[in-house]
Image: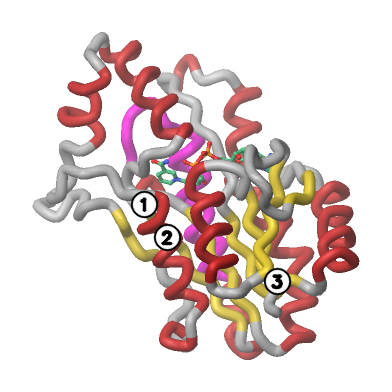
Amino acid sequence: MKVAVVTGGSSGIGLAIIHQLTAQGFKAISWDINPPKEDVPFVRCDVTSEEAVKAALSQTQSQYGEPTILINNCGLQFLSPVDEFPLEKWNQLISILLTGTFLCSKVMIPGMKKNGWGRIINVSSIHGKVASPYKAAYVAAKHGVLGLSKVMALELGEFNITVNSICPGFVDTPLMRQQLSKQAELNQMTEADVASEIMLKPACIKKFTTTEQVAGMVNYFISDAAATITGEAFSMSGGWGMGQ
Ligand SMILES: NC(=O)c1ccc[n+]([C@@H]2O[C@H](COP(=O)([O-])OP(=O)(O)OC[C@H]3O[C@@H](n4cnc5c(N)ncnc54)[C@H](O)[C@@H]3O)[C@@H](O)[C@H]2O)c1
């Protein structure tokens, strides 16, 4: 049975990915700082610490076997104008979103190489391709994830390891709900107006993407149909910015 690690698998998109991978017969484990509220395999891990990531890998190997699928998904958001952005928050977002993706990939690549097959899927964001105000650290980190993905795709192709990214627009999760209220406060608008006039404004389809739809794209990147696809960044944003 193939073993998959999903960082941030205890909530939102990560949890939906765990459900779908499990349903397909994979052993999918959440690496998260918070335990899941339901009964899914869980290894406590703060992805910003190399020591913690190495310890989580050892525990995963001994409990479940060598992981050959990695979904770098965990994340958080913080909104502030650049000139007021606290350095501590900048460092925290870069560490979790970008350094965490680097560290988890770094420790798992040797096992994938030995296995002669591997899949790394990074949950970036449409903010890996475009910007929005007040999201300096998030946008910088998510652009960085796409750059890191391209480097890994180049290095790992010969080992039959693909590296792809998913770039969702807004997905209905606790992270998105928290942004909705913060944006309403920053812009002095109702949450409904933030949803229609800010979040979904650049999209052709004015609907939030679901966690299950993002998990479906993970399934595709793991499948044999995607065996020669690598280094790609696939948008799931309702068609953000098509008119620009
Ligand atoms: N929700 C959206 O609208 C949206 C859109 C585009 C991209 N994304 C990306 O999708 C990913 C998942 O987001 P979500 O909306 O499901 O969020 P979520 O808040 O529901 O889940 C995030 C998970 O990450 C975990 N986490 C946070 N810091 C961690 C750390 N240091 N180590 C390990 N785990 C940690 C949290 O405990 C949580 O379980 C994020 O990378 C996010 O940037 C989300």
* Dot 3 or dot 1, earlier in sequence: 3
Q: Which residue is mark 2?
A: 166
Point out which mark residue 122 bears. Answer: none
Side of 126 relative to 23 (left or right): left
Q: Is disc 1's CB within 8 Å of ligand 1?
A: yes
Q: Which residue is at a point 33% across and 13% down the rendered structure image?
A: 186
Q: What's the distance in space between the residues labelled 3 and 1, CA to CA?
A: 25 Å
Badge 2 element? strand
Q: CA distance from mark 3 to mark 2?
A: 20 Å
What residue is pinned by disc 3?
3
Answer whether labels 2 and 1 touch (C-beta < 8 Å): yes
Where disc 3 sits, the SS reads strand
For the magenta stretch, what is the residue range?
A: 130-151
Q: Quadrant of the N terminus?
A: bottom right
Quarter of the rendered structure image containing ligand 1 = top right
Q: Which residue is mark 1?
A: 168
Q: Nearer the viewer, residue 92 or 23?
A: 23
